């Protein structure tokens, strides 16, 4: 499986499809298979390159569903979307779910634990031939904020980069070709708002691992805190999209491989602006080539990341 690439040299847009009753932003809205399928198709119509189907909430404090329940939630949606020709990612920490989803048509396995939650995950991905997203992770949702401490020299950026380097090595050792691996710094997972901002500022260090980066910041709490009212109350989940859209544009300029988002249309609008301005700046306006100039961590070809 060759990693999919974004359009016109811009980041890949990964649309979030939570088939859960308890996700932080849209829990329960798409738990019915027909509603989930309709929403997945709507994400594609709005411009998603990939639809990421997840059957387990990873919001802080969430309880894990039984394996059978996760399979029941995920597989019909993956199979139906794949049959439509949609590029599907399965968001799971379980090897059995990953293997079954790939069998049903998923092309990517998005594992927020980076293979740490299930010892069988990396061998399963290697055997499946799917692409693999390994995120920085320290513990399951019910305990992860207990581990939001980064005391080594270099702080959170150095520790996350080192840990992701170890996960990349583990994946390759298990038989997953390096060119099929994407890395995710894991914003919000065992991290405070300050950690998230430090990671965003330090993405070049993570990109130095030589693999494409996926960033998921959509509607997360650190944006709500940034936009807090005068009394300190964070901005509600549904009112954070404008800030996220601004961040999307900045991340596109940073050259990330992919953006995991809820509002695909707003993300596409932001990327259209970035692409058009980049084309003007490089003298390509009117040529049909709206590619942005390479930047730190920029994609240099399908699935390849800069090592700057």
Image (cartoon, rainbow, N blue to C red):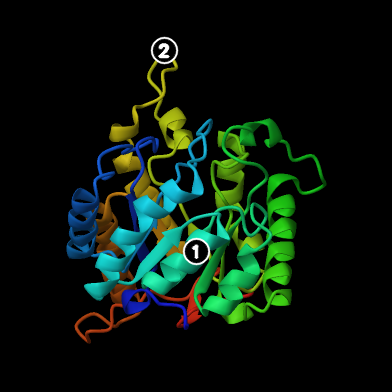
For marks 1 and 2, the one nearer the N-term is 1
Foreground pick, 297 / 263: 263
Could you tell me residue 183's position as x and y percent?
A: 58, 64
Residue in view at x 64 percent, y 71 percent: 123
Q: Is residue 255 visible?
A: no
Could you tell me residue 27's position as x and y percent?
A: 33, 37
* In the image, residue 16 above or below residue 302: above
Residue in view at x 63 percent, y 39 percent: 190
Task: Give me the disc on residue 231.
Answer: 2
Could you tell me residue 137's position as x and y percent?
A: 63, 49
Task: Give me the disc on residue 98.
Answer: 1
Residue in view at x 46 percent, y 34 percent: 221
Q: Is residue 122 visible?
A: yes
Q: Quadrant of residue 235?
A: top left
Q: Quadrant of the C terminus?
A: bottom right
Could you tell me residue 120's position as x and y percent?
A: 65, 63
Q: Give the distance between the C-alpha atoms of the residues marked 1 and 2, in whole angstroms.
A: 44 Å
Going by the picture, which residue comes out furthest to the front? Answer: 68
């Amino acid at each position: 499986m060759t990693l999919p690439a974004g359009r016109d040299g811009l980041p890949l847009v990964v649309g979030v499809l939570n088939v859960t009753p308890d996700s932080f932003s849209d829990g329960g809205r798409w738990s019915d298979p027909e509603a989930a399928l309709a929403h997945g198709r709507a994400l594609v119509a709005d411009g998603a390159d990939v639809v990421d189907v997840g059957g387990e909430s990873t919001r802080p404090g969430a309880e894990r569903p039984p394996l059978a329940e996760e399979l029941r939630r995920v597989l019909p949606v993956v199979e139906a979307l794949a049959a439509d020709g949609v590029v599907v990612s399965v968001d799971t920490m379980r090897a059995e779910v990953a293997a079954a989803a790939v069998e049903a048509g998923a092309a990517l396995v998005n594992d927020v634990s980076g293979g740490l939650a299930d010892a069988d995950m990396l061998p399963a991905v290697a055997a499946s031939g799917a692409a693999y997203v390994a995120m920085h992770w320290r513990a399951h949702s019910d305990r992860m904020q207990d581990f939001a401490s980064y005391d080594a020299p270099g702080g959170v950026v150095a520790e996350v980069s080192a840990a992701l380097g170890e996960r990349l090595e583990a994946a390759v050792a298990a038989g997953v070709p390096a060119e099929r691996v994407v890395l995710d710094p894991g914003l919000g997972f065992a991290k405070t708002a300050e950690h998230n901002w430090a990671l965003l500022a330090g993405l070049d260090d993570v990109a130095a691992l030589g693999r494409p980066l996926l960033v998921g910041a959509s509607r997360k709490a650190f944006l709500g805190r940034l936009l807090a009212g005068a009394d300190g109350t964070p901005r509600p989940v549904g009112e954070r999209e404008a800030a996220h859209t601004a961040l999307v544009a900045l991340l596109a300029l940073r050259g990330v491989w992919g953006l995991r988002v809820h509002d695909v249309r707003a993300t596409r609008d932001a990327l259209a602006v970035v692409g058009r301005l980049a084309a003007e700046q490089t003298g390509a306006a009117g040529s049909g080539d709206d590619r942005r100039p390479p930047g730190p961590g920029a994609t240099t070809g399908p699935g390849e990341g800069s090592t700057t």
